Image: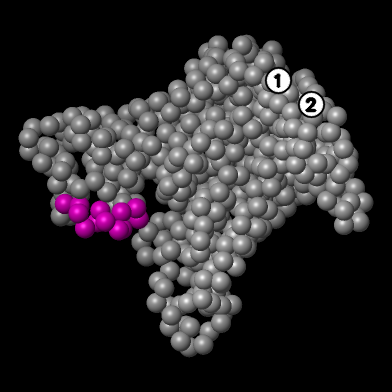
Amino acid sequence: MNRSTSRSWWKTAVGLLLTGVMLFPVYWMVNVSFTRDQDMRKSPPDLFPAHGTLAGYRTVLDEQLPYLATSLVVALGTVVLTVALAAPAGYALAKLRPRGGGVLSFLLLAAQMVPGIIMAMGFYAIYLQLGLLQTVPGLIVADSTLAVPFAVLIFTAFMSGIPGELLQAAQMDGARALRTFWSIVLPMSRNAVVTVSLFAFLWSWSDFVFANTLVNGGAHEPITLGVYHYIGNNNQEWNAIMATAVVASLPAAVILVLAQRYVAAGVTTGAVKD
Amino acid sequence: MNDTKQLPDRRSAHDRNGAATTAPPRGPARVRRRPASSQWAAWAFLAPVTLYLALFYAYPLYRNLDLSLRDYTVRSFVEGDAPFIGLANYQKVFDDPTFAPALLHTVVFTAVCLVFQYAIGLALAVFFHQHFRLSTTLRALFLVPWLLPLIVSASTWSWMFNSDSGIVNAALHAVGVGPVNWLTSPDWSLTSVIIANIWIGVPFNLVVLHSGLQSVPGSLYEAAALDGANAWQRFWRITFPLLRPVSAITLLLGLVYTLKVFDIIWIMTKGGPADSSTTFATWSYQLGFGNLLPAFGPGAAVGNLLVVAALVFGLVYVRAQRKQALS
């Protein structure tokens, strides 16, 4: 008894150490964000922000709020668009089993293999003609391509698990497919909606490639470009750069704390990230 | 019919536990012949996504193919009258002095990242599969690098790798190794972006392999322990072989994703110095968007080579997954 508890403590210690090593870059980002300008080039660097300063964060508040607002709008728009497109498709593939559904599932899998830069080039060419470059709706549509195929697969997997008797009972009562979907399938799929929304939000919030090709230099740029311009324009104020990076990471942190199990479920049900 | 066969296969892959028992009894006739009205309903639900795929995947891909076969300048790009030049852009790309290094870097980057991400991910998965205090919480924390925006990870690593004031060189100095110009020397730039990308990819491998471990029956380990097998033998004789299908899918997915890694390299080194960390992904972007005078045609050509590679491995992935679903 005694022996096994001591062994388990030893494992916890190793686990803590490994996690510490893995998360060191994250700690370092936070540390640098609080470091004073004059300590930035110190050698060796301070391991703790002993003379901490909030100057970096003050700069974020002064300069980055519009970027953050754009990111929020774009990410929420992407979530709505993704769920609206993918949930009905998941229902059809899981429960209505149409002819040709297998081909469509295959195309959705293949769509996830297309490199983002290729999509960006194609979108650039199309948006140039349509006049959608540097617009928020244009970026929302482009960002949704990161999540839609993944979302359909998640919805299909999840909705397959809804008992068929329930849907048949609804049909007996005279409900048509749309009603069955809206008042039975969708409410029962809340977990899938949460998982899909989390990933759609996170990927759209994190997107750099589409932002840099489609809205760079426009009136509405997301926070990823905010960070990117910072690195490009000054490589002196690393506390401000890292403070922006910390702020840009907040959604990830919040999602991890609040919805850890949805994230794990999403990764293992066929998660994808590029 | 091929497509009517695929769907039940996919289903069984996902709802093997649970739904298979609760699903209504499906006679063969039911699967084959749905009433026509239900077909209409199904395609009404699928119509938005189908249209979406056509507009936002197929059409950009087609535009990209078209771009690669024409001689584009900025002017003709806007006016849309670029002359058709066949495969000349591809010829140009193959003859380019950047081609060989970019191919080499793509292969090295992908292979090294895959091996380390998988090995580290597997070791951590086995470690965190044990039950000890905080194991679930710590495993969740490992997801952080994977959830962070790539611009954040890339800029953090850029600062850590800074030649003069970076923590990496400070640590090396502490153990008596001289400073390394991680991002500014052609000898080290590829290594630097590989290290950063391994760090980003480990969590994905950890989570997927960990979920694979949970399906390995514990009774096998008990039997092996009775036979006197040590931990090392148990890993190589039981864990590793039983994990093979999950490993195959993890590696294939990793391959497809690593092939197209762009953000990390672009943000940290822009493919430089002197193309020393250029891969197909960054080269394509460099040609299309990185210069004052964009070379859309050759850029699209390089990109299409990347698409072909990704789709080939993607097909292997789909086959592997279907095989696993059947078994």
Local SS, label 2: loop
Query: As drawn, is B63 to the left or to the right of B181?
Result: left
Numbered circle sitting on residue A237: 2
Q: Looking at numbered disc 1 in the image, what kind of residue is underneath it?
A: Thr
User: According to the image, label 1 marks what residue?
Assistant: A59
Q: Give, as a single range, the part of the protein colored magenta.
A: B13-24
Q: How is the image coloured?
A: one colour
Asked which quadrant contains residue A34, the reply is: top right
Q: Name which residue lies at 63% across and 37% down.
A: B150
Residue B297 appears in view? no
Q: Name which residue lies at 43% across and 80% down.
A: B222
Q: Looking at numbered disc 2 in the image, what kind of residue is underneath it?
A: Glu
Is the C-beta separation of discs 2 and 1 under 8 Å? yes
Q: Position of residue B189 (x, y in %)?
A: 81, 44
Q: Position of residue B122 (x, y in %)?
A: 57, 62
Give the number of marks. Answer: 2
Chain at tag 1: A
Chain at tag 2: A
N-terminal-most mark, 2 or 1: 1
Can residue B21 be found in the magenta stretch? yes
Which of the two residues, B268 or A251, is positioned nearer the viewer here? A251
